[in-house]
Amino acid sequence: MSLASRNEDVHSLPARESGPCTVQLRSPYLIYFGNVPDAGHAKTGLGLIQWRRENCAGQFRSAGCQVDGGLADMSIADAAASGVGSLVIGVASEGGSIPDAWVGDLAEAARAGLDLVSGMHVRLSDFPEIAAAARASGARLIDVRTPPRKLPVGSGEKRPGRRILTVGTDCAVGKKYTALAIEREMRARGLNADFRATGQTGIMIAGSGIPMDCVVSDFLSGAAELLSPAAPDDHWDVIEGQGALSHPSFAGVSLGLLHGSQPDALVLCHDPLREVLLGTGGASHFPVIPVRDAMEQCVTFARRVNPAARFVGLSINTSMLSDTERQALLDRYERETGLPAVDPIKDGAGLIVDKILSRTGV
Amino acid sequence: MSLASRNEDVHSLPARESGPCTVQLRSPYLIYFGNVPDAGHAKTGLGLIQWRRENCAGQFRSAGCQVDGGLADMSIADAAASGVGSLVIGVASEGGSIPDAWVGDLAEAARAGLDLVSGMHVRLSDFPEIAAAARASGARLIDVRTPPRKLPVGSGEKRPGRRILTVGTDCAVGKKYTALAIEREMRARGLNADFRATGQTGIMIAGSGIPMDCVVSDFLSGAAELLSPAAPDDHWDVIEGQGALSHPSFAGVSLGLLHGSQPDALVLCHDPLREVLLGTGGASHFPVIPVRDAMEQCVTFARRVNPAARFVGLSINTSMLSDTERQALLDRYERETGLPAVDPIKDGAGLIVDKILSRTGV
């Protein structure tokens, strides 16, 4: 990308792989860990290294940092000198803000011409020191929670190309991980597959995407249509799901994404030990609905936009189970659904990809 | 309302009947018809007069205006002198913008201290002459398509009070009209009922509300929860539905609204002559789904948040049918569903309110 184009607003950048106005990040990345106290607060950076090691040039750690992502430690000056494109904030803060301790580092990076990439709730441009540094150098300030402007209303018009969508019985049941594992497995087999990101961490990993829960609701399915645009017949989009149709806080996002994605293949993600939906632990707690009911709901709505839609597998979180319990549980899901049930962290997504290919005759 | 509070942002006004941060309009109104060429472009103003005649002080018509709402004609100066609170733009323009011919009138009204209320896509404050006039007088510029700030994420927590939601097999099948007719009928019977508006025309009629399709999708059900807050046990919120669960462009909005509304009673709105969903006339046109399927989908999701949810009637558009056809059709729907089927424009909503009361034992 030329220097001239770097001053453009991120949302008016020319189309690359995905739609004409999704967020697009500039690699390679310097992963910012700052003074993060534990790995739990560094999931974004660690996930980025796990899934896109090839795009990560180094890590920035300041005094007191308790995390090591296994990359070369780099100063801002080192990063700028070696052609790093963006500093990516790889840590979460309490409350989603940017602590004072980070602001100086971020401003220094912007001054050195690195784009800054943030998934925080606050905007980078709300910090005068950072904003001034970016103006001076032409660096872009990219808040991945900010959706593209000028999104279309969904048309429902069928697009060429094939699509897999991960759906779930709740939030935080592995929809992003499962989609990434499927993409990795498909690419390892030489298939033409792209992960399509719909949340801030996914967008950082993919380098592009649309933060679906930040989109104005009239444009939900239109945003999803834009995210996985028309593609060759042998191309697979592997789309990161959001929320759950049965979650009273987020079902609208899930349904808009489902309709706009027009999935050929669905994978249900589920945590068998989760009894109550996340965020609903109060007086009105909501039980997680049975796997079969969740599948029935999703496939009914998916067939509205793609009559060929079908489930191709289950992704089950078995991290808290013994090996014996784990295998018995996966076997039971397989018997009950007739579909492969795997824990992609332990088993990979090979069985699911086998099923996708057998069903679609590729 | 004191002059001091008129300079506050509309979204920070204190709570009145509905939630703490829904749009709140100041009556009485001067309905602006400008130079509108036909009644089709004046639906907003005519609807406001139809449903809230008591809040309408007069109409403003300029040369060439082809519409008469039956109100006293008033100049801006007349309106200001007689205590009018707001000028409401009662006409639609091509493309949703504000034509030059209106700008002078609107600026004059703002200068005279009238709030301006617009449902256009453009913002009133984007017109320098209007913005300057409002700043000088303290008048508020209220774009009803702008949702409140600081909306909450939906909790699913059950609220006291009773709620009716109109749903549909498509867009533009009478969801707003039906809700207003039910509110009118309930009030005529001395019941404690409030129409809750979710679209721009509805908001103008109600004087408050939340433009659901403009809300950021993460907050869809939270906005709907705010719209019909906790209320006494004998209070009825009659909530204007949006879109349709079966509409691939807008289903996300419909589902978020359904979950957040926690309806006790649902009314299905349907146009029996509509074969294809509005806005999907292209290669991928979508058939309108059968009434029974639409009801089944809606009630399944409604029961997730309110196990007592049930349908209480059908609202059928019979405007294009002969009297014989019309009665035969309504009879058929009644037989098939066991529920009253009415065209509220011809029959009113009495039979539906009878059913609501018989079912809930009020």
Image: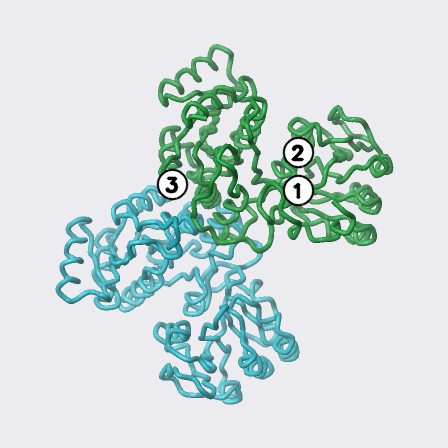
Chain colours: A green, B cyan
Q: Secondary structure at mark 2?
A: helix
Report in which chain the residue with disc 2 lies: A
Residue A23 shows up from this direction: yes
Three-letter amino acid code of the residue under disc 3: Phe
- Residue at image position (54%, 62%) is B146
Q: Secondary structure at mark 3?
A: helix
Three-letter amino acid code of the residue under disc 2: Thr
Circle 2 residue: A44
Q: Going from the N terminus, do you reach mark 2 or mark 1 first? A: 2
Q: Indicate the position of residue A168 as horizontal and vertical percent values.
A: 46, 33
Query: Mark 1 and mark 2 in contact (Cβ < 8 Å)?
Result: yes
Which disc, if any, is residue A119?
1
- Residue at image position (81%, 41%) is A105
Q: Residues within 10 Å of mark 2 (few under 14, many from 20)?
A: many
Circle 3 residue: A301
Q: Indicate the position of residue A359 as horizontal and vertical percent values.
A: 40, 25
Q: Is residue B2 left or right of residue A246?
A: right
